[in-house]
Image (cartoon, helix red, strand yellow):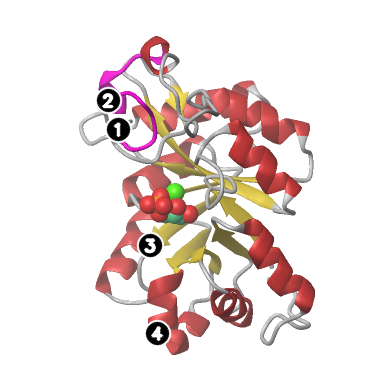
Amino acid sequence: MEIIAHRGASGEFPEHTLLAYAMAVEQGADGVECDVRLTADGHLVCIHDRTVDRTTDGTGAVRRLTLDRLRRFDAGAPGHPQPVLEFEELLDFALDHPRLGLFVETKPDPGRGTALERALADRLRARGLARDPRLRLMSFAPASVAALGRLLPGLDRIQLVDRPAGTRSGLRRALARPTHLGVNLRGARRDPVRTRRVPDLRYSWLARGDADVEFAAAAGVRWLATDFPDRARAVLRRGAPGTRGRSSR
Ligand code: G3P
Ligand code: CA
């Protein structure tokens, strides 16, 4: 099972900053996760929320801010400034670490069609990454996963769902036609029997404690996201129950 640092090593460092990603690598992460949004002027930035209010010293919706304006905000911790991370910079970082996986989650804005997916496809093609096996795309939005399938058919696409089964999850999967499924670990743990039956389950988030890591390994998860990659790595190193002798799917 591979450990994926969720927004970088974001349990200890400011999320979606180069510092958090560098520390994730230091802590032994096999891959990193990021969320991407589109600025008002069509640039891709790594920001989770709809607005910059929680994670920077600025305010406003990302979709209404230009890249130039976002560059003036601080996304770091008090006394340790960090710029808002542009997706291009994260690509540079990932390319500098050839064994690192990159999991890119789209956060599309309603009303902007497939502008985000087209911008992403554009950037990945320009960097020669349209068929790179280290890169995986994902979203909660089935329309986004489906659009990525049309634009970038050579890449893995993960549909995120909160529960391993049920009408909502089934509908999302049917609309998105993903290559794999990603299931919220909370929903998976509530329904372990059906979780083990999901044939294309590969990704899960968010491991918080040792028992989460052990559960995910036993359920056959291949990529496990966590804010604390060092803790998850320690569980795997110890060969805790459920992780012993398990290979990736
Ligand atoms: O890795 C998937 C997970 O990040 C989805 O939830 O809200 O943290 O983007 P969220
Ligand atoms: Ca995410």
- Label 3 – label 2 distance at C-alpha: 35 Å
In front of the other: label 1 or label 4?
1
Amino acid type of the residue tagged 2 in the rendering: Thr
Pointer 1 residue: 53
Mark 1 surroundings within 10 Å by alpha-carbon count, few (fewer than 14), some (14 through 19), many (20 or more): some
Tell me which residue sits at (29%, 64%) in the image: 171
Looking at the rendered image, the quarter that the N terminus falls into is bottom right
First reached walking from the N terminus: tag 3 or tag 2: 2
Highlighted magenta segment, given as a residue range: 53-67
Q: Among all residues in the image, which is located at the extreme top?
A: 68
Mark 4 lies on a secondary structure that is loop
User: Looking at the picture, how far across and down is residue 222, in whole percent?
Assistant: 64, 67
First reached walking from the N terminus: tag 1 or tag 4: 1
First reached walking from the N terminus: tag 2 or tag 1: 1
Mark 3 surroundings within 10 Å by alpha-carbon count, few (fewer than 14), some (14 through 19), many (20 or more): many
Pointer 3 residue: 173
- Secondary structure mostly taken by the magenta-highlighted segment of the chain: loop
The magenta stretch spans residue 153: no
